[in-house]
Image (cartoon, rainbow, N blue to C red):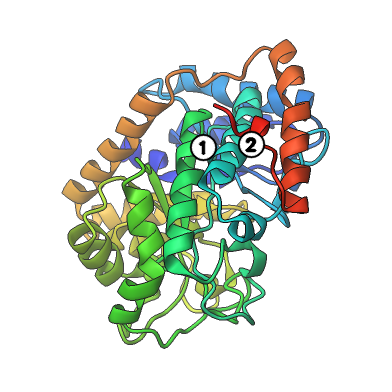
Amino acid sequence: MKNKIGQHLIIGLKGPTLTAEESKFIVDNNIGGVILFDRNVQSPQQVHQLCQDIQNLRHKLPDKQPLFISIDMEGGRVARLKPPFTRWPAVAKIGELDSTSVAFKFAFMMAEELRSVGINLDYSPCVDVLTNPKNTVIGDRSLGKDPEVVAKLASALVRGYIKGGILPCAKHFPGHGGTLVDSHEDLPVENADLKQLMDVDLIPFKKTFRARLDFIMTAHIKFPQVDPQYPVTLSKKFLHDILRTELRYRCVVISDDLGMGALVKHYDKKEIPVLALDAGCDILLFCNDFDQPALSLEAIHKALDDKKLDVARLAESAARIAAVKTERLTQPDPLPMTEVTKLVGHPDHLRLSKAIVEGQVPADLLGT
């Protein structure tokens, strides 16, 4: 079991190339994947090489499983890949058009560009219902304020990403649309009870589950009326009782970044990963604190030795991660660079992006 613990981690990298130290850490600890940020991105050629270097490490891992190479590409202000990659608008624009065809094509075309350079997991779509119009943390990252419209369009986005060869991840469970506090800075506390969450916020999540969604991301939000003790990421009530048992979600649960203020200001860094795994997270995400993954691995191993983590649950979780890799990441390497240059910033992609911004999408762009 212990040699599989690293598969439960996705970690950040320091720069545009993979360092010898990072390669060693990934191989020695059997790390499950990485997340790319602006600091890791310079050009299509550079991202292509970085993804190839990362993916080549799988041949040195015990199970030879491919790595998740993940990114935040929603469109609008959450977009790590800059031109010549297509600049996509915020999904609020898709919400205004209220077109599943546009949503599907948007995600499919974005996925083609991501997949070409070797990225295989996108932390998108944001399926939060904008229940508070003053919420600038989410704002135009939301498809809108009507849960049924958000559900319908989010499902189309999920299907588009999958068709384009990308694993989508719906976020932020159970809904980040009502918050005013930014969880990067501190812990939002929300007054919604379970009935309100079920009647509004959870509707889009349930719809995306039916679209063959493989990943869901937790929110670092505390809902005292549902769980008075823990925020969602650390809550068995949310992740086991509601998500697994009541909503019957069977696929991978990934935490939001465990280095965010919402958690590190309220919990010990060694306590966080153990609580998250115990609550029901399958994968722990570490973005910007480069010391946290090693610290977390040490804490998890100690918790296993002290029998504070359930080995059977962790084994089940590891099997879930392995199944997604086996079934979905059948061709993990980037496409040849000649294909990449054809797909990145493709004229049709640029046309669709512009048409969405202008609010009128010609029918010829929506053909399959």
Q: Residue at x 29, y 63 (%)?
A: 239
Give the secondary structure at mark 1: helix
202 over 104 or under it: above or below? below
- The numbered dot on residue 110 is 2
Residue 218 in the image: state x and y as whole percent: 43, 61
Q: Residue at x 20, y 50 (%)?
A: 313
Residue type, label 1: Tyr
**Labels 2 and 1: the sequence-earlier one:** 2
Q: Quadrant of residue 335?
A: top right
Marks 2 and 1: CB-CB under 8 Å?
yes
Of the pair 258 and 137, the residue shown nearer to us: 137
Decide if residue 158 is on the left or right side of residue 88. left
Q: Residue at x 56, y 66 (%)?
A: 144
Residue on which disc 1 sits: 161
Residue 211 in the image: state x and y as whole percent: 36, 43
Q: Residue at x 34, y 80 (%)?
A: 196
